[in-house]
Amino acid sequence: MIKIVEVGPRDGLQNETAMVPTGAKVAFVDALSESGVSEIEVSAFVSGKMVPQLRDAAAVFQGIRKKKGVIYSALVPNIKGLDSAVATGADKISIFTAVSETFNRKNINTTVAGSLERFRPVVRQAKKLGLPVRGYISTAFWCAFEGKIAPAAVTDLAGRLTDMGVDELSVSDTTGQATPDEVAALLDVLLPEAPADRLAVHFHDTYDRGVANVLKSVSYGIRVVDSSAGGLGGCPFAPGATGNVATESVVNALAGTGEKTAVNVEQIHLASELLKPYLPEKTPAGPDPESLACKTCQFSGGSKCCGS
Ligand code: HMG
Ligand code: MG
């Protein structure tokens, strides 16, 4: 059985320019709760200046009807975020760092080492409270600023997070550039260090490779897959990155391989429909041509960009 972690309410809505009303977010999460997903990342307790779309995280948590058996998690960047998540009854927290120094600076205003120092007390406190901890490893394949990421660097970061006490690692293709061969190359070196039952995969779908990458990961024994209803999402600090791979597409594709999920696609569709009045029509997949990396060298500014 493949577990689906629905990240639309957090990863999806953080990247929509539209401000979705709190009541609509609550209705969205409640509808997702009926879909059979194992876990819902409800929101993020981060700086409201950086991600104004999720300023109402506490109100969303307070408004939702929790369904037994579903885990409701929150993204937190520091102790302040952990305190807010605990106060609103989150069942699990997610911390987030990246292999790329540049992306970390832009996303959480610190270095990779600085992020680990910041997260150490967060993980310690969460464990004391009995909360499971997920750790995102962003830019695990490519970075919009630093280019291709070496699998060894991902393995190293995975080891550091594990040593800190993180329970689950979500290996993230932040920009949606990974190919199935790159997924295989990473898992070949990562799995001996971090077994499949501690890993999740998180693919953005910028180049329509999300489903192929999920299928490749599952063929390696990965059993937890992140996705977002309707393919909502992206990261405001990763130029060009578009939505997560759509939950509907993942569930349909897995069904075709004989792998089971507990997810009802029709219910995911109903949940997505609830947001339609608030969001612009989805454009076809592919990077936003205005915001993606330099067209000549694919590095978005920074020291590696050719500057053309
Ligand atoms: P900073 O400026 O270094 O930190 O930001 P600070 O402690 O100086 O705080 C700055 C302001 O933020 C202060 O407010 C704090 O109170 C406030 P001010 O005094 O200026 O009014 N603040 C907070 N407010 C609410 N909740 C908090 C919190 N912490 C500080 N927890 C910080 C550092 C990490 C806080 C900031 O950079 C931040 O919030 N970054 C989050 C950015 C973000 O959410 N990015 C998207 C999620 S990551 C992602 O999408 C990738 C992922 O999907 C995987 C993948 O695809 O790769 C997970
Ligand atoms: Mg993401």
Image (cartoon, rainbow, N blue to C red):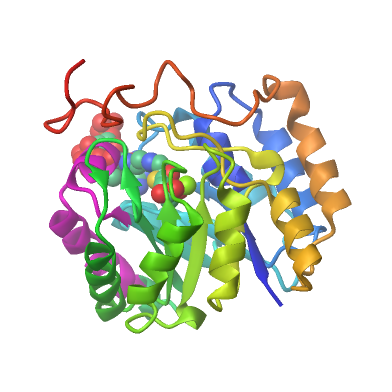
Q: Quadrant of residue 122?
A: bottom left
- Image quadrant holding the N terminus, namely bottom right
Q: Position of residue 31 (x, y in %)?
A: 80, 49
On-image quarter of the C terminus: top left
Q: Is residue 172 magenta?
A: no
Front residue of 30 and 4: 4
Which residues fall within the magenta stretch? 97-125
Can residue 4 be seen in this snapshot? yes
Q: Residue at x 63, y 50 (%)?
A: 62
- Residue with the most extreme left position: 303
In the displayed structure, would residue 236 be above or below residue 160? above
For residue 244, which quarter of the picture?
top right
Q: Is residue 46 visible?
A: no
Picture coordinates of residue 146 (x, y %)?
22, 41
Residue at the location (31% across, 36% down)?
Answer: 144
In the displayed structure, does residue 66 sit left or right of residue 178? Answer: right
Q: Which residue is pictured at 17% across the width and 62% down the height?
A: 117
- Identify the residue shown where x is 47% and y is 43%: 176
Q: Nearer the viewer, residue 249 or 212?
A: 212
Q: In the displayed structure, would residue 168 be above or below residue 278?
A: below
Residue placed most toward the observer, 194 or 180: 180
Residue 113 located within the stretch drawn in magenta: yes
Is the residue 112 above or below the residue 44 in the image? below
Dominant SS of magenta comes to helix
Residue 195 in the image: state x and y as whole percent. 43, 83
State the count of labels. Answer: 0
* Residue 172 position within the rendered picture, expressed as x and y whole percent measured from the top left: 43, 55
Q: Left of 209 or right of it: where is 160?
A: left
